[in-house]
Image (cartoon, grey):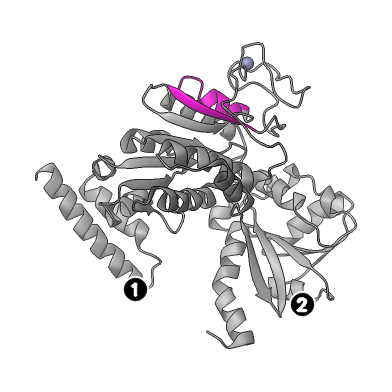
Amino acid sequence: MTGSFRLGVACAVGALAGRLSKALGRGRGETLSGRVILAIDPQAISKLSSGRDVVVVSGTNGKTTSTKNLATILRDFAGEGVSTSESGANMPAGIAALLAQSPRNRFAVIECDEMYLPDMYRQLAPKVVVLLNLSRDQLHRTGEVRKVANLWHEAFSRDDVTLVIDRDDPFLEYAAANAGHVIRVSFNGRRHPDAATCPNCAAILNWSSGDYACPCGLGKQLPDVRADKRLDGPQRNTVLVIEAARLMGAEILADEAQDLINKSPDRIHDFMVSDKKVPTHLAKNPESWRQALGDVTSDQVVLSVNARGIDGRDTSWLWDIDYSALLGKNVVCTGERRLDVAYRLSVQGIEVSVASSFSKAVENFPAGPIQAIVSYTAFQDLLTSELGISQGKSGSR
Ligand SMILES: [Zn+2]
């Protein structure tokens, strides 16, 4: 088979498999479709991305939201078709499927899992790579951050890529150390919870000025963009996304950029439970929990943690978080691991109770604002049951 014929067959059969999978109710069909494409043509990702303007987004927190945000900004400001994953699929099969879907779009904005980034970088040959942040995920506790930083450091030892990074993160500064072109965005320093020692030389980093310094010189490069220190996580990600969009050719004026930062999408979703609105944070790892806890203003808080599939079965990461923001509040734990969370909080002197379900947790609160922080599969469960909940109450759907 010739290369383009093989690719054509791969995409046709892959699309068919995806439609079948969807029709049989086995999910969106993206992953199966991508697996079929890659089984028939292992070079499909590089072929499908060839001649297109690709930008890749990776990092521990905010990848999916930032990828959607960047795709929207490019659509609005560059006026061109943009291919992107709607579902947050970020591994090779999902990436192959999204590229195959609209091969004529000039732009492709691709979310990539951290571990797959070096390989996808080689295959996709992106113009720009956005590195949002790197911190411990809940799934792999030991040495993971350093392992990923080392992989990235080796992958980006080439001249033909432009990286956009948050240089306040020492792991990203190290990852970008040999890259040809780097846009360093600084938010004027911010202590990194996992970076006591230097990713480059293992010396103890000096954080005394609120920023890091090392005798080996890591972090000495001046930033290209200085942004407001007071921005929160989603807003910081938007600043990086705007820089990437500009590199891709979007003209974004200063006041338009400020507007985009003000309207930064975050991971809060309002669920209606028993006629009560519950703004709910999706938090998947210690860093996103810290951010979510920083946003808790209500006195009534629901925490829901599962340990299923993508959550990881090991909940020991719960002990890496400081919950003092919850002291004195009315906290109810739910989810499959509610007892783990309740015990962790009680050790920190926080009074908690447990409920058998999210809706029961909410129903037990008296009037007044409620906020929730939930793990990945707990969030998915809420999204799935949302239809049922709103249907029962409003009858509108
Ligand atoms: Zn060093």
Q: Is residue 76 left or right of residue 133?
A: left
Identified by mark 2, the residue type is Glu
Q: Is residue 250 visible?
A: yes
**Percent coordinates x, y for residue 55 in the rendering:** 40, 41
**Percent coordinates x, y for residue 323 in the rendering:** 80, 49
- The residue to which callout 2 is attached is 363
Residue furthest to the left in view is: 1
- The residue to which callout 1 is attached is 24
Q: Classify 197 as above or below 327.
A: above
Residue furthest to the top in view is: 215
* Quadrant the N terminus occupies: top left
Sequence-first disc among 1 and 2: 1
Q: Is residue 245 left or right of residue 355?
A: left
Q: Is mark 1 within 8 Å of ligand 1?
A: no
Q: Which residues are magenta?
A: 170-186
Is 177 part of what is drawn in magenta? yes
Q: Secondary structure under badge 1?
A: loop
| Quarter occupied by residue 351 | bottom right
> Could you tell me which residue is drawn at 80 percent across and 55 percent down?
343
Q: Is residue 98 left or right of residue 222?
A: left
Q: Is residue 307 visible?
A: no
Is 210 part of what is drawn in magenta? no
> Could you tell me which residue is drawn at 36 percent across and 36 percent down?
126
Nearest the viewer among 155 and 222 is 222
